Image (cartoon, rainbow, N blue to C red):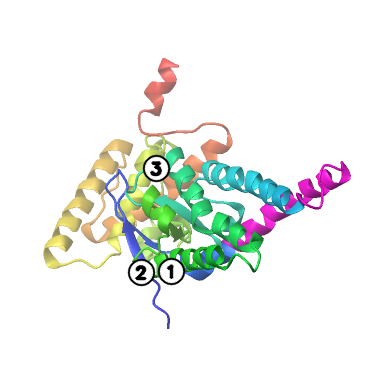
Amino acid sequence: MTIRPMDQLLPPEGVPLNFRIAGIGVRTAAQISDLLITGVGALALFLLTLALDIVTPGTAIAIASMLFFFIRIPYYAMSELIWNGQTIGKRLMKIKVVASDGQALTTQSLVVRNLMKEAEIFLPGTLLLTLDANQMVPSIISLLWIMAVLAVPLFNKRRRRLGDIIAGTYVIHLPKPVLLEDMSKATRQPVADEQKFRFLTHHLEHYGAFELQTLEGFLRASDRPKGPAAYKRHKETLAAIVDQIRRKIEYADPVRAQDQQAFLEAFYKAQRGYLEQRQLFGDKRADKYHAAQDDQA
């Protein structure tokens, strides 16, 4: 099994994010896709110049190289600016450019990394293709330069080429989004104690989406393993939340200690269903202060 290199990115919010570093293979595939796109554009313009009888046999290669250059430079820089570090090829391969310091990508860094790509690969490659057999020394120098810069990503942890090192960027795989299970549609069968709790409309008028999300976070944390001290704190918090909700919604029936978890889960499902129903009618309740906000409006 291949172990893919991972890296940790620390954004300004201070929450570390773990990403899989894009390897040479997937980046090469993205590069080939982008070359095909820009090559088709350059070919179309070249054929247009042929139709207009602008090109002569002696200048055909030079004009074709120039057209490829003037399409390639804006394509890479503008697409990565517009799509936040992605070209079409990178989007197809599900990879993107990120700043190594965790900050947002800047125009300067994206322009620098793409201009360096010209100095690393494209200009030496063009020189290598256009030189004839009599110019061996420049051809060998160009070939050695290309081989050297292609080897650079193999010798650093983040697989960065020279342009990435200078611009302070590197390329990662896009994380696969994983959605947590909807707690209101959990597959767990409700226990008998949970089924007995019923909430009327006036019980559900008090809270909004913010409180519902807070309650959901607490319920999700309830299923995590806990040590003795953490379990005790959780039970105390559970009792306090149940007591606060009962007083807020004026729920008269007592809730036994062993029923508190079932009470919260039943209330969460009923509150969520009620808020979703209200939202269908254009009544978006952000938090428990929605009534005061409506009065001010």
Give the amino acid at mark 2.
Phe
| Labelled pair 2, 3 in contact (Cβ < 8 Å) | no
Pick the residue in front: 294 or 90. Answer: 90
Q: Nearer the viewer, mark 2 or mark 3?
A: 2
Alpha carbons under labels 2 and 1: distance apart: 7 Å
Mark 1 or mark 3: which comes first in sequence?
3
Q: Nearer the viewer, mark 1 or mark 3?
A: 1
Alpha carbons under labels 2 and 3: distance apart: 26 Å
Q: Residue furthest left?
A: 229
Image position of 250 with respect to 148: above or below? above
Q: Quadrant of the N terminus?
A: bottom left
Q: Residue 86, percent across and down? A: 53, 51
Q: Is 263 on the left or on the right of 162, as rendered?
A: left
Give the amino acid at mark 1.
Ala
Image position of 272 with respect to 127: above or below? above
**Residue tagged by mark 1?**
151
The magenta-colored residue range is 31-59
**Residue tagged by mark 3?**
104
| Labelled pair 2, 1 in contact (Cβ < 8 Å) | yes
Image position of 96 with respect to 209: above or below? below
Pick the residue in front: 13 or 223. Answer: 13
What is the number of the mark on residue 27? none
Q: Is 157 on the left or on the right of 115, as rendered?
A: left
Residue 45 part of the magenta segment: yes
